[in-house]
Structure formats: structure tokens, C-alpha cells
Amino acid sequence: MKNKKVEALYIKDIAPHEEYNEAHLKHLKNIILREGILRRPILVDEETGMIIDGTHRYTILERMGFEAVPALTVDYLEEEIVIMPWNRVYSGFDSRGLEFGSDGEVRIYFNGKATHVSKPYRSNDAIKHIDTINADRLIKYVRHIPEEREFIVVTYKPPSRYEVIEIFKSGLRFPPKFTRHIIKNIEIPEINIPLLDLISIYRLEKRLSKV
């Protein structure tokens, strides 16, 4: 793995490619405030300033008025990156506005059996619709589809890197927790930066020089 240097960026110079989940945001904010530190840097595309990983952390820090953020910058289109879905687990399911069939980029597992969402056909449109009407039924986001059949699981075909860049540059955003990026040759370190050091770019640069 390559060890890249964590650097200080102005928070105004970066932006996410997906929206945030308010419940997840509140949960993560409580953890960050309780610990008083930011454990890991935000992953950013060096060309566009697009946040690859860290949308919720960025949103928390931006809302709190911090000036700087620790970041690892990478070349998004050159690095060896795999995009995976964040599977959604629900306690129940409202299917209004959805049509089911044998095709489509989204699959829903009912009692262990899968059916495709044929309308909306594209994964980002279908997931955005599902997120909206089932917000109060969402239990968690998971990497792998659980075997427990009492839950309803939604999974989907993730976008390509080029589709992510296209959406970002257009000013649109994917649904919350839509992309899970795996970068095979880069190690993201634990840095444990005190929140007070994010007040200014100068303070953060000074802190990072000691890490």
C-alpha cells in the first residue's frame, strides 16, 4: 500500500457527490463531539475537490463553522478504485411508486427472494425514491446482504467513476450512502486530530506537521 501524506484543505474548496442522511449525521456528530477528535481524514479527488469518502464528516464540520479539514487527495480516475453499494436494511417496506419486473439496477430481497425494480429503472432514481418513502423504516447500511429473512434488503448496481464525476460536475447529488469506495493501494491512516485544530488552516497544518 502507498502511504500518502495527509494535508490541510480549506473546507470551502471541497464538496460531496452525494447527499447526507440526517439520522446518520446526528449519530456521527454525537460520537465526534463526545470524542473531541476527527479520527480519519476525508478522501478527496485532487482534480475536482470532490469528496470520495467522508460526506457526513464534512457536513458536520461545515455546519459547525470550521475552516480546515484534514484530507488525503488522490487522482480519482487513475487510482485503482472499486465502487460498491451500501445495502439498505429495512424493518418494513412501502412499495408505492415502484414497479417490479425481471430487469432494473435495483434488487429488493423479500424473505430471501429477490425481485428487480423496473421503474424507476436507474439505481440512483430508484434508491432516492425508496429512501424518501421508507425513511422511518431504515435500520442500517451494510456491506453484505444479511441472511436474516425477517428484514427487507435493497441492493443495486453502483455507478462507475465516470458517472460519479459527471453527477458531481453537473451540481446534482446521489442519494445518501450511495457509493462505497474501495481503494486497493492506499492506506487511510488514523490521525485523531482535535476538533479545535480545525478552526484555522494554520492550526491544522501545524498539527499535521507533528503527526
Image (cartoon, rainbow, N blue to C red):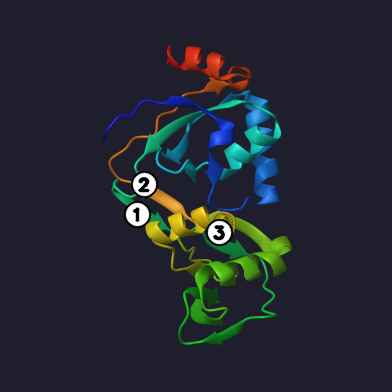
Q: Position of residue 145 (x, y in %)?
A: 47, 64
Q: Which residue is mark 1?
A: 82
Mark closest to the chain's N terminus, 3 or 1:
1
Q: The disc labelled 3 sits on which kind of residue?
A: Phe
Viewer-closest of 28 and 73: 73
Q: The disc labelled 2 sits on which kind of residue?
A: Tyr
Tell me the element at label 3. loop
Viewer-closest of 72 and 191: 72
Mark closest to the chain's N terminus, 3 or 2:
2
Q: Quadrant of residue 117?
A: bottom right
Q: Position of residue 83 (x, y in %)?
A: 39, 56
Cα–Cα gap, marks 1 and 2: 11 Å
Mark closest to the chain's N terminus, 1 or 2:
2
Tell whether 91 sits left or right of 126. right
The residue mark sitting in front, 1 or 2, is 2
Tell me the element at label 1. strand
Most distant residue in the right direction: 136
Cα–Cα gap, marks 3 and 2: 17 Å
Q: Position of residue 20 (x, y in %)?
A: 63, 50
Q: The disc labelled 1 sits on which kind of residue?
A: Val
Disc 1 packing (10 Å; few <14; some 14–19; many ≥20): some
* Label at residue 174: 3
Tell whether 169 sits left or right of 63. left
Cα–Cα gap, marks 3 and 1: 17 Å
Q: Position of residue 124 (x, y in %)?
A: 54, 67
Disc 2 packing (10 Å; few <14; some 14–19; many ≥20): many
Image height check: is 145 above or below 81? below
Tell how many labels: 3
Q: Which residue is mark 2?
A: 76
